[in-house]
Image: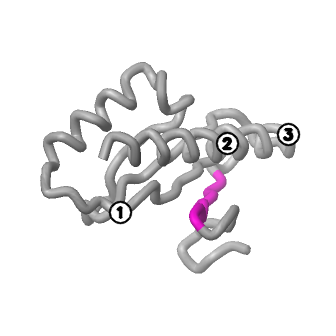
Amino acid sequence: QEGSKGYFELQISDEIRIELRGIEGQGGFFRTNLFLFLTPEKETVFRQLLEANYLYQSTMGCVLGMDPNEKYITLSLYVYSPMTKNLLWDSLELFCNAWDYLKHNFEKKS
């Protein structure tokens, strides 16, 4: 259901809640919090984010970032094609797989 902030929330599991925004006639945007940013070593995390985002090799086309308040590491995906039902499901599957891979990869490094 669409929230008052202009996006739909999709609860996949207890751990993952995805915000979905339609980009009128041009695709969609997926976003979720990957994990709480607790380490005081920002430089280390920034380096890991840059390494993970490099050529999207370990992010599967998604983008890792940080929320504006620097509380969460975020994962987002832009889909630049008009959204069909099949594209929505394929994009959602890719996004959830990237979330799962990155969540476990970052947990191993910390």
Q: Are marks 3 and 1 in contact (CB under 8 Å)?
A: no
Answer above or below: position of 58 versus 20.
above
Q: Residue 58, image x and y in percent? A: 48, 28
| Residue at which label 2 appears | 27
Answer above or below: position of 73 versus 9.
above
Instruction: Name the mark on residue 63.
Output: none
Identify which residue is drawn at 48% across, 22% down: 57
Considering every residue shown, the one lying at the far front of the view is 108
The CA distance from mark 3 to mark 2 is 12 Å
Along the horizontal axis of the image, is 101 left or right of 92?
Answer: left
Q: Quadrant of residue 16?
A: bottom right
Quick one: SS at disc 3? helix
Q: Are marks 1 and 2 in contact (CB under 8 Å)?
A: no
Foreground mark, 1 or 2? 1
Q: Residue 28, image x and y in percent? A: 64, 47
Quick one: SS at disc 2? strand
Name the foreground residue: 19 vs 7: 19
| Residue at which label 1 appears | 36
| Residue at which label 3 appears | 86
Q: Are marks 3 and 2 in contact (CB under 8 Å)?
A: no
Identify which residue is drawn at 29% across, 59% down: 37
Q: Which residues are magenta?
A: 15-22
Amino acid of disc 1: Leu
Q: Is residue 21 magenta?
A: yes
